[in-house]
Amino acid sequence: MKKNQSIVIGNWKMNPQTLVEAKRIVTKTKTVARTLEHTLVVACPPFPFVSLVASKRNSGASGNRVHAGVQNAFFEEQGAYTGEVSTHMLADIGVEYVIVGHSERRARGETDVEVSKKVAAVTQSGMTAVLCVGETVRDAQGAYLNTLREQIKASLQAFPKRQLSQLIIAYEPVWAIGAKEAMTPVLVREMVIFVKKVISDTYGQEEALAVPVLYGGSVNFRNAADIMTEGHVDGFLVGRESVNVPGFIELIKVVDAVSAKK
Ligand code: 13P
């Protein structure tokens, strides 16, 4: 990732409820995204709306548009897996990013082993895995750091160094998701350093520094600039604000302005 480039990924979760509204969000976001020079914007809508952003023709082209992502994919290649979607299908329609291991999926039973298989499947299909990690609670003794280290290592079990360029880490402390306030920029900075250290211990320092680390958890256009500058993040994974058009547009503009000065 270039020095003055940032990534903002919108995780729409299970929103909005109609195709008309999804189209409105995509159209308005595109209008602004195409004017930004330092920010790569990705939208991860629910599966029924993915075709609004996914296009085979555009896939791989950089900048000036909204890139296509999804919120999950299955690790098996094909076959009798009712309700699942394969990484091959997604790559085939032009999806470039897949969120893997979001805490809302882990809370419903997704294990580190499954997450690691998904990271492998996504990258082997040529897409980028947006691996979500984060502690559930912060204890005064700092045990959460060990938990986080183990979660990162287990989620990247057997993940090869040569595919690191297809990996983004989204650090999302679970307690800050859907909350009133985001984590403070100072704490974000500490945690970004910690995540990079864990990656560096496994893959080497130079490689670790090249893996983008995003922050997620109650990010909005008001707190984005401070978290970016003081938190030293490479961008954001955004929930609620990503489907709130005026807020998201303001957010990506703020990120672009800060990135331009990086
Ligand atoms: P909020 O931005 O709504 O807190 O959600 C964060 C998140 O879970 C993004 O993946």
Image (cartoon, rainbow, N blue to C red):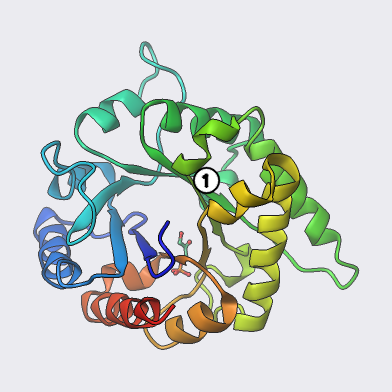
Q: Which residue is under mark 1?
A: 105
Up/down of 93 relative to 97, above or below: above
Q: Position of residue 79 (x, y in %)?
A: 36, 11
Q: Is mark 1 within 8 Å of ligand 1?
A: no
**Furthest-top residue in view?**
79
- Quadrant housing the N terminus: bottom left
* Residue type, label 1: Arg
Using the image as rendered, state which of residue 181 and residue 237 is in the foreground.
237
**Which image quadrant for residue 136?**
bottom right
Q: Position of residue 80 (x, y in %)?
A: 38, 12
Of 211 and 149, the residue lying toward us: 211
- Height in image: 196 above or below 68? below
Residue 73 locus on image (x, y percent): 40, 34
Side (left or right) of 238 relative to 203: left
176 or 237: nearer the viewer: 237
Residue drawn 60% across the image and 47% down it: 207
Q: Position of residue 146 (x, y in %)?
A: 82, 53
Q: Secondary structure at mark 1?
A: helix
**Residue drawn at 52 percent across, 80 percent down:** 227
Residues packed near mark 1 inside 10 Å, few (<14), some (14 to 19) or many (20 plus): some
Residue 252 visible from this viewpoint: yes
Position above or below: 9 against 46: below
Which residue in the rendered view is the most extreme toward the right? 141
Q: Residue at x 36, y 77 (%)?
A: 255
Examine the rendered structure and indicate whether residue 175 appears above or below residue 72.
below
| Residue 85 seen in this snapshot | no
In the rendered view, does 205 fall on the left or right side of 229? right
Residue drawn at x 70%, y 49% is: 200
